[in-house]
């Protein structure tokens, strides 16, 4: 069973963003949300690593994060952090969708 390295990297980036938000601005909500979502995403990446068809936790957490940060980006227009996290979340949703559809396992016959 392959380890979901992109999933773990995404989880680490979200958690690190929360820690950075606390460090730079003293934002306790940023720290809490970053660690909460980062932990949930790491759990989802672990589940996908154990069984590639078990992507529910990862997809749910990523979708919530995309929605929240997309809303914040829409209202504020600030690319960092809301726009970046929203873009990463959408990329992860697309990655999960492609893997769930089984498109990465098909071979092209030439």
Image (spheres, helix red, strand yellow):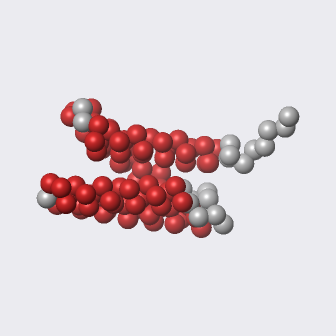
The number of callouts visible is: 0
Query: Is 55 placed above or below 43 here?
Result: above
Between residue 97 and residue 76, name the one nearer to us. Answer: 76
Residue 36 rendering spot, x and y as whole percentages: 31, 62
Q: Residue at x 45, y 65 (%)?
A: 43
Farthest residue, direction front: 24
- Residue 38 figure quarter: bottom left
Between residue 57 and residue 26, name the one nearer to us. Answer: 26
Q: Residue at x 53, y 65 (%)?
A: 47
Farthest residue, direction right: 110
Quarter of the image containing the N terminus?
Answer: bottom right
Does residue 76 appear anywhere in the picture? Answer: yes
Does residue 57 appear anywhere in the picture? Answer: no
Residue 81 rendering spot, x and y as whole percentages: 28, 45
- Residue 103 figure quarter: top right
Q: Is residue 80 left or right of residue 64?
A: left
Q: Is residue 87 left or right of residue 74?
A: right
Q: Residue at x 68, y 46 (%)?
A: 104
- Residue 73 figure quarter: top left
Farthest residue, direction left: 26
Q: Residue at x 38, y 56 (%)?
A: 13
Quarter of the image containing the C terminus?
Answer: top right
Residue 22 rendering spot, x and y as whole percentages: 19, 59
Query: Is 90 placed above or below 18 here?
Result: above
Residue 93 rendering spot, x and y as whole percentages: 49, 44
């Amino acid at each position: 069973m392959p380890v979901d390295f992109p999933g773990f990297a995404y989880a680490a980036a979200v958690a690190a963003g929360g820690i950075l938000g606390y460090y730079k601005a003293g934002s306790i909500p940023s720290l809490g949300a970053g660690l909460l979502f980062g932990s949930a995403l790491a759990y989802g990446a672990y589940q996908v690593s154990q069984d590639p068809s078990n992507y529910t936790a990862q997809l749910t957490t990523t979708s919530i994060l995309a929605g929240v940060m997309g809303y914040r980006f829409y209202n504020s227009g600030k690319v960092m952090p809301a726009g970046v996290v929203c873009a990463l979340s959408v990329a992860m949703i697309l990655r999960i969708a492609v893997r769930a559809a089984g498109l990465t396992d098909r071979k092209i016959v030439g």
